[in-house]
Image (cartoon, helix red, strand yellow):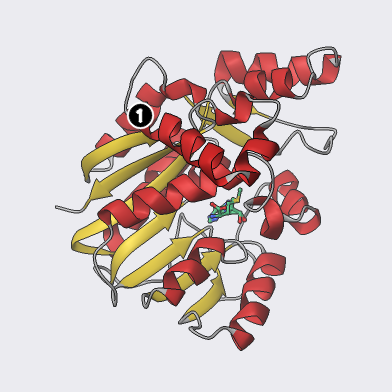
Amino acid sequence: MSHDLPRLDDAIRSYYDRRPEEKRLSQGASQIEAARSKELIQRFAPDPPSVVLDVGGAAGAYSFWLAAKGYEVHLVDPVQRLVDLASARNEDAPRPLASAEVGDARSLEVPDGAVDMVLLLGPLYHLTTAGERATALSEAARVLKAGGLLFAACITRWASLFNGLVHDRLADPAFVTMMERDLETGQHRNPDEFPGYFTTAYFHTPDEFRAELTDSGLGLLGVYGLEGPAGLLGDFEERWADSRKREDLIRAAREIEEEPTLMGLSPHLLGVGRKR
Ligand SMILES: C[S@@+](CC[C@H](N)C(=O)[O-])C[C@H]1O[C@@H](n2cnc3c(N)ncnc32)[C@H](O)[C@@H]1O
């Protein structure tokens, strides 16, 4: 595989070069994103050993979890720093990844029909044109075996609005400018690289996301809201630390996971598709 760094928006590369993405899923409301993503992956995934390609796998949060279950996992990410972290962790892993390489969702260096599952948990929201997202989805479909599964995530259109309310950011004019653009166009930009305001991305409406997945030609098994209202709760951390209350948060998210009128509450949606 080529080790030339993939063509990536400068702001995205700089964000992941500086921000500790490797810790994100163990902090704050991202913890319910991780728990629910794993729940949904387990709901559909074939038994191990099957071959998994984790595209945009970062430092391997989902890759190492699946490898520990006995899957053959290959991780791809365009950010060298994150791939290096995955490779370092792999040296001591009891069940290591089969590979961790620099690569890009738009051009996978994987043969046709080689894998049983593709995780696309990140690339689609960092590809800001419909054409690039279609290319990434078509690459995912190409590398899947017939009957193989795609798990793809998006960020929803109202994520900044809700995040701004929870963190009381609507008094910050820079935040409001960014949020209004999100709401009008879905195009999220943080040109001054304010910490905590994320980076270049596209935020989907649920209908757009469903349409893009359907257009990929995969059979759509479902689109699911991941977090539900959990991230709106000011005392999320305290509730998450209490096992009974944590189950309630997860239950609330699960109860409304396919309810069209409530899907946009979740900052992330997970689409599941099967190659015909
Ligand atoms: C928010 S992180 C998500 C990481 C992990 N998959 C997760 O769900 O927690 C987004 C990831 O997408 C990666 N990414 C961005 N653009 C990409 C592209 N064109 N192809 C593949 N991965 C990309 C980033 O480098 C980053 O690791």
Task: Give the vertical position of 6 relative to 51 (above or below).
Answer: above
**On the rendered structure, is 246 left or right of 197?**
left
**On the rendered structure, is 53 left or right of 5?**
left
Residue depicted at x 45% and y 63%: 54
Task: Give the vertical position of 248 relative to 93 (above or below).
Answer: above
Which amino acid lies under the numbered mark 1 shown in the image of this protein?
A: Glu
Q: Position of residue 105 (x, y in %)?
A: 47, 56
Q: Position of residue 66 (x, y in %)?
A: 43, 69
Residue depicted at x 45% and y 82%: 98
Q: Position of residue 8 (x, y in %)?
A: 64, 52
Task: Give the vertical position of 92 relative to 239 (above or below).
Answer: below
Q: Identify the secondary structure beneath mark 1.
A: helix
Residue 59 in view of the camera:
yes
Looking at the picture, tell me which residue is in the foreground, 130 or 227: 227
Q: Which residue is mark 1?
A: 255
Residue 1 in view of the camera:
no
